[in-house]
Image (cartoon, helix red, strand yellow):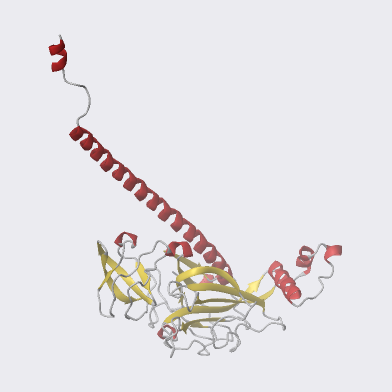
């Protein structure tokens, strides 16, 4: 009896079986964690893109509102130009940003609001508010008028290497007949710094990587796409409604006068259609961007980064310092690039430079005063 019991095998796992089971469990856990991480990454990317697009869409709505009311009378005006900035302190103006100034019609409510703002800025008493209901009552008595609007981008930082490639979008508005404020079209409004004086504009959004405004003249053909150039059928990135050569063509090539801008009959030449292009990158997005791990010379056709999975899809535009590149095929932590796109110049980049990219948004606006003659 004892012999029979001694011959029976004990139930349980051997050491080898236990090690194998633990190994399989570890592999499964790694796969599960990777799946969760990838799912969270996709979710964060989708959420970030949605947030950025909503932010850019709000800017686009305000931009469209300003353009739809362009004034085509003797007091009307539109100036679109590009301005260069030195963002790294080397004395070279390597970055360029657009600046748009215009005159549009304003509703009685807008006139009353701007008048109230000016009164408060001047410290004037807000008379009649208690008796007549304040601003709302004055809106009913206000008449329509003309408003100057300025849109401009200025560098976000001149000291932070990760932020100086980005811009801050500013917008300002003033009544044309307001004697207390300086006209946005005054030659000395911005001064030598290219930045607006305090209180004249409000910050709309930060993290602007790319902003371009394109205009279609009477001769431009854009129904098959917007082609930037100096031919009559091309679109233009600069505009001067009165032909005064205000955009400085010697500073930026995109400031060349387009042959389709013709001033006649004492009225400003207005664009027929305007296209706004935006790419925005939030400060929190920068924390998830990759960096160069090797020096990139001006002739290199590939870049090496610390995490290739953090690059956008091939075909996307990336910004390193002040140079835009088009991303090609990505292999591990290395990627092919097309250098010096979007009107930038190929230059050398140091290891550690941040690779910027954002969610693109485009908005097209038909100018109301030209709609009856527009044939897309």
| Furthest-top residue in this view | 1
Residue 240 in the image, given as x and y percentages of width and height:
51, 84
As drawn, 233 above or below 30: below
| Furthest-front residue in this view | 2
Quarter of image, res 325 = bottom left
As drawn, 164 above or below 54: below
Q: In this view, does 185 lie to the left or right of 281?
A: right
- Quadrant where the N terminus is found in the figure: top left
Q: Nearer the viewer, residue 110 or 264?
A: 110
Q: In this view, does 335 lie to the left or right of 166?
A: left
Q: Residue at x 40, y 81 (%)?
A: 232
- Quadrant where the C terminus is found in the figure: bottom left
Residue 163 in the image, given as x and y percentages of width and height:
46, 72
Q: Residue at x 18, y 35 (%)?
A: 16
| Furthest-right residue in this view | 131
As drawn, 282 above or below 70: above
As drawn, 301 above or below 18: below
Residue 152 in the image, given as x and y percentages of width and height:
53, 77
Total labels: the figure holds: 0
Q: In this view, does 231 lie to the left or right of 61?
A: left
Q: Which of 106 and 43 is in front in this view?
A: 43
Quarter of image, res 345 = bottom left
Residue 72 in the image, given as x and y percentages of width and height:
59, 78
């Amino acid at each position: 009896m004892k012999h029979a019991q001694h011959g029976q095998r004990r139930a349980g796992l051997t050491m080898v079986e236990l090690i194998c089971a633990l190994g399989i469990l570890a592999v499964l856990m790694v796969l599960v964690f990777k799946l969760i991480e990838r799912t969270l990454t996709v979710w964060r990317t989708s959420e970030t893109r949605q947030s950025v697009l909503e932010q850019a869409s709000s800017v686009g709505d305000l931009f469209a509102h300003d353009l739809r009311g362009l004034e085509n009378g003797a007091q009307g005006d539109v100036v679109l130009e590009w301005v260069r900035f030195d963002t790294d302190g080397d004395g070279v103006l390597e970055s360029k940003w657009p600046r748009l100034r215009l005159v549009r019609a304003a509703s009685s409510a807008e006139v009353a609001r701007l008048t109230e703002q000016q009164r408060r800025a001047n410290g004037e008493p807000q008379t009649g508010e208690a008796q007549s209901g304040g601003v709302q009552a004055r809106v009913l008595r206000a008449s329509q008028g003309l408003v100057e609007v300025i849109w401009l981008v200025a560098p976000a930082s001149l000291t932070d290497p990760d932020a100086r490639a980005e811009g801050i979008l500013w917008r300002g508005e003033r009544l044309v007949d307001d004697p207390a404020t300086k006209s946005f079209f005054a030659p000395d409004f911005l001064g030598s710094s290219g930045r607006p004086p305090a209180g004249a504009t409000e910050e709309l959004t930060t993290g602007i990587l790319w902003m371009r405004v394109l205009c279609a003249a009477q001769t431009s053909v854009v129904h098959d796409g917007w082609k930037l150039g100096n031919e009559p059928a091309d679109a233009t990135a600069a505009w001067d409604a009165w032909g005064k050569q205000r955009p400085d063509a010697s500073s930026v090539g995109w400031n060349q006068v387009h042959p389709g801008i013709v001033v006649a009959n004492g009225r400003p030449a207005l664009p027929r259609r305007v296209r706004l292009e935006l790419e925005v990158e939030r400060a929190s997005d920068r924390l998830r961007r990759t960096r160069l791990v090797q020096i990139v010379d001006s002739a290199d056709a590939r870049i090496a980064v610390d995490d290739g999975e953090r690059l956008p899809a091939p075909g996307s535009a990336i910004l390193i310092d002040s140079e835009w590149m088009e991303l090609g095929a990505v292999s591990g932590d290395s990627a092919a690039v097309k250098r010096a796109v979007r009107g930038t110049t190929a230059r050398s980049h140091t290891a550690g430079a941040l690779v910027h990219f954002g969610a693109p948004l485009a908005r097209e606006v038909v100018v109301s005063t030209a709609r009856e003659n527009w044939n897309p």
